Image (cartoon, rainbow, N blue to C red):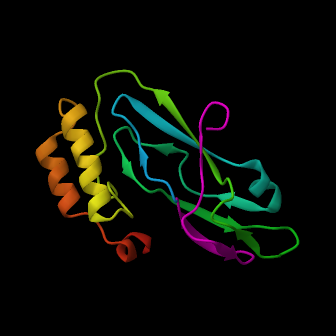
Amino acid sequence: MDGDGYVLTVRDETTINYLEHINMVSKEIVFVPPDFVAHLTAKSAFGRMGLSFLNSAKVHSGFVGRLALEIVNLNNNRKPITIRRSDPFMHFELISREGPPEPYHGRYMFQFMNDAEVARYMETIEANFSSAYRVGEIREVARARLTQSEELEP
């Protein structure tokens, strides 16, 4: 926790060269309950270094998985920037949403998760959120989730 939200770190230490665009993967698995939406904001320390965050600042309600954080190095001095695994990287804030839940069921559900992690979250969904999710459909999404290499391709 950090103030009003959580802080995400990155799964792998990476050095980003000037003008290089990469997808950083969060170390943490996020689960956005169906009656919430998540908002992402960059830690200002990295913005001051010249990193620009390209992806949308929203995570859909009902999403489960590690996040792909799209970044580019725009450092004025054209120097590489290193992000370490333990560095606080991104704020993750949950915001209550209005209306009936419409959980995410798209192709990025369960991204960057292994089978045991998916099984654990499926148990949680089925036990606590079965009225919000289309459980049969989400089981199919879990079985057909993308492999890590496919997810990082443009």
Is residue 58 in sight in this rendering? yes
Location of residue 15 in the rendering, given as x and y in whole percent from the top left corner: 69, 76
Q: Name the residue rendered at 29%, 29% in the picture.
A: 101
Work out whether residue 129 or residue 55 is closer to the camera in this orientation and state it. 129
Is residue 129 in sight in this rendering? no
In the rendered image of this protein, does residue 69 appear above or below residue 39?
Answer: below
Horizontal arrangement in the rendering, residue 152 relative to residue 117 (left or right): right
Q: Name the residue rendered at 24%, 40% in the picture.
A: 125
Answer with the quarter of the image where residue 57 lies: top right
Q: Is residue 129 magenta?
A: no
Q: Name the residue rendered at 39%, 77% in the picture.
A: 149
Horizontal arrangement in the rendering, residue 78 relative to residue 59 (left or right): right
- Range shown magenta: 1-26
The quadrant the N terminus occupies is top right
Residue at the far right in the pictured view: 77
Q: Is residue 23 magenta?
A: yes
Residue at the far left in the pictured view: 136
Location of residue 154 in the rendering, given as x and y in whole percent from the top left corner: 44, 72
Answer with the quarter of the image where residue 50 lies: bottom right
Work out whether residue 77 or residue 85 is closer to the camera in this orientation and state it. 85
In the rendered image of this protein, does residue 115 appear above or below residue 135?
Answer: below
Horizontal arrangement in the rendering, residue 85 relative to residue 142 (left or right): right
Residue at the far top in the pictured view: 98
Location of residue 47 in the rendering, given as x and y in whole percent from the top left corner: 76, 55
Location of residue 141 in the rendering, given as x and y in whole percent from the top left corner: 21, 56
Q: Name the residue rendered at 71%, 74% in the picture.
A: 19
Work out whether residue 135 or residue 115 is closer to the camera in this orientation and state it. 115
